[in-house]
Amino acid sequence: MIVILTVFAVLVLYDLPRFIRRKESIKVIAIYISLMAASLIVSLFLAANKRPASPAQWIEWILKMIGVVK
């Protein structure tokens, strides 16, 4: 897991200064951060030998939470 965290840290430290130097919009930086965070979470789950929940399970949980499905 340390290797995965190190790789993601290096990628972020390599890419973010480029975004700032190019003066990219905040939308681009937000999308980049959200994609990197999602990738990191999935990678850590896989490294721990745990399957992450499928998108169908997430959608079902959200629909149950707002009361659409019982």
Image (tube, rainbow, N blue to C red):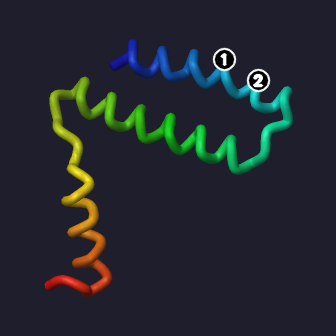
Left or right of 26: which side holds 67? left
Structural crowding at the residue carrying mark 2, measured as other residues with C-alpha within 10 Å and reported as few (<14), some (14–19) or many (≥20): few
- The answer to whether 48 appears left or right of 38 in the picture is left
- The residue pinned by badge 2 equals 18
Q: Residue at x 23, y 68 (%)?
A: 61
Please tell me whether mark 2 sits on a helix, a strand or a loop: helix
Mark 1–mark 2 Cα distance, whole angstroms, equals 7 Å
- Using the image, determine if residue 30 lies above or below residue 13: below
Horizontal arrangement in the rendering, residue 20 relative to residue 13 (left or right): right
Seen at 75% across and 48% down, the residue is 26
Q: Amino acid at mark 1?
A: Tyr
x and y percentages locating residue 32 in the rendered image: 59, 38
At x 16%, y 28%, the residue is: 49
The quadrant holding residue 29 is top right
The part of the image, by quadrant, that contains residue 21 is: top right
Q: Secondary structure at mark 1?
A: helix
Name the quarter where the N terminus is drawn: top left
Q: Residue at x 61, y 25 (%)?
A: 12
Q: How many marks?
A: 2
- The percent position of residue 27, horizontal first and vertical second, equals 70, 50
